[in-house]
Structure formats: structure tokens, C-alpha cells
Amino acid sequence: MIILGIDPGTATTGFGIIKKISKNKKPINGFGFECVEYNVITTKPIHSAAERLNQIHKTLNRIIKTHQPTILAVESLFFFKNLKTALPVSQARGVILMTAAKKKLPVHEFTPLQMKMIIAGYGRADKKDLQKIIKELLGLNEIPKPDDAADALGIAICCAIKIAGGTIQSIKKKNRQKNP
């Protein structure tokens, strides 16, 4: 199983790819997934909204073609503080959902609150604490940067945990029992 996590945005769209560790490999820190890649899709403000959305679509298509994810997990817009930023983010989400539909990828959506709750056990977890947990779960040498890429990895991890039907603690415990 390969999960592509997406943190949508028009200027920067974060993406993070995790894959299930093969049965003959010991899970990192009790979590049965490893990091494949993470980064951001960056668009330039000098381009029109249509050109920026098209660039997100084309780059996302390349990422999907390269990594062949089986699931796409995307951050959903739960609330917004600024209408000026909410509309472009919604447009980017639309492009991401359309791209997933064209590739026949199942989509799972999570709010930032849900992600924090599932990964950290606390819906109001601090961004830095969440990033430390992501680093630990995936056995990374450093906290993933930029923030949008770290959030995308968090969304992918959240999806993996949700699909496994548990909490991060129960998944780690189950994997430790399988791979002592």
C-alpha cells in the first residue's frame, strides 16, 4: 500500500508519500510505514490562477505516475479565517480531487484537527510537536521541511492509521508483537 498525502494550496501544495513496509522488514518505531518522498509543488504568483492550477494538476500527475499510490489522502478545509485564501485553496483541492478521480484513486479526507487527534492524540497539538512525532514515526533524520510537506506526510500517516482501524499506540503495539 502506498499513500499519497496532500496539503493543498495554490502557492505551495505539500505532498508526502509513505508505503507499507514489506513483511520481512522490521517496522520503524513500531509504525508499519516508511517515507518514500516529500516536497512541495510551488507555483508562481505571476501566473494566472488557471495556469497555477494546471501546474498543480500536471505535477500531481507526474507524482502519481512515478510512485503509483493506491490511496490519496487530502487535507479538507474545515474552516477558514480569510476568504481571500480559502477560495484559492478550495480551487487547488478541486484540482487535486479531479486528478485523483481521473486516476481512479480512492480519496480519504481529513481536517487538521482530525490529523492532530489521530497522530498526537490531541486535536490542538502544536505544529512542532506534531512534526517531531512524524519524524519519529517515519524514522527520518530530521523534521520534514517545509511545513506544507510535513503536513502532507501527517495526512498520509493519519490515513494509514485510520485504514488500519486504530490509534497510533495500538498500531505500534500490534507491529511490535508481529516483529519483536
Image: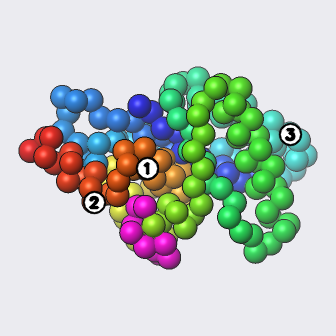
Magenta residue check for 170: no
Sequence-wise first label, 3 or 2? 3
Q: Position of residue 108 (x, y in %)?
A: 57, 45
- Please indicate whether residue 131 sits to the left or right of residue 16 in the image: left
Residue 123 position in % (x across, y down)? 49, 72
State the residue at coordinates (45%, 33%): 2
Distance CA(mark 3)–CA(mark 2): 43 Å
Please state which amino acid type lies under the numbered disc 2.
Answer: Gln
Query: Residue 54 at x, y = what percent?
Result: 81, 36
Q: Residues within 10 Å of mark 1 (few under 14, many from 20)?
A: some
Label 1 secondary element: helix
- Image quadrant assignment for residue 101: top right
Find the residue positioned furthest to the left: 180
Q: Tell me if 137 is positioned left or right of 97 in this view.
A: left
The disc labelled 3 sits on which kind of residue? Answer: Glu
| Pointer 2 local density, CA inside 10 Å: few below 14, some 14–19, many at least 20 | some
How many residues crowd mark 3 within 10 Å: few (<14), some (14–19), many (20+)?
A: some
Q: Is residue 66 above or below residue 42?
A: above
Mark positioned earlier in the residue sequence (1 or 3): 3
Residue 62 point in image, percent of width and height: 63, 27
Please report the residue visible at 69 percent of the width from the left and 60 percent of the height from the top.
77
Which residue is label 3 attached to? Answer: 51
Query: What's drawn in magenta, residue-wise?
Result: 118-126
On residue 169, the disc is 2
Quadrant of the rendered image containing residue 78:
bottom right
**Residue appearing at x 34%, y 42% in the figure:** 33
Instruction: Find out whether residue 125 is within the magenta segment.
Output: yes
Alpha carbon separation for disc pair 1 and 3:
35 Å
* Outermost front residue: 165
The circle drawn on residue 162 is 1
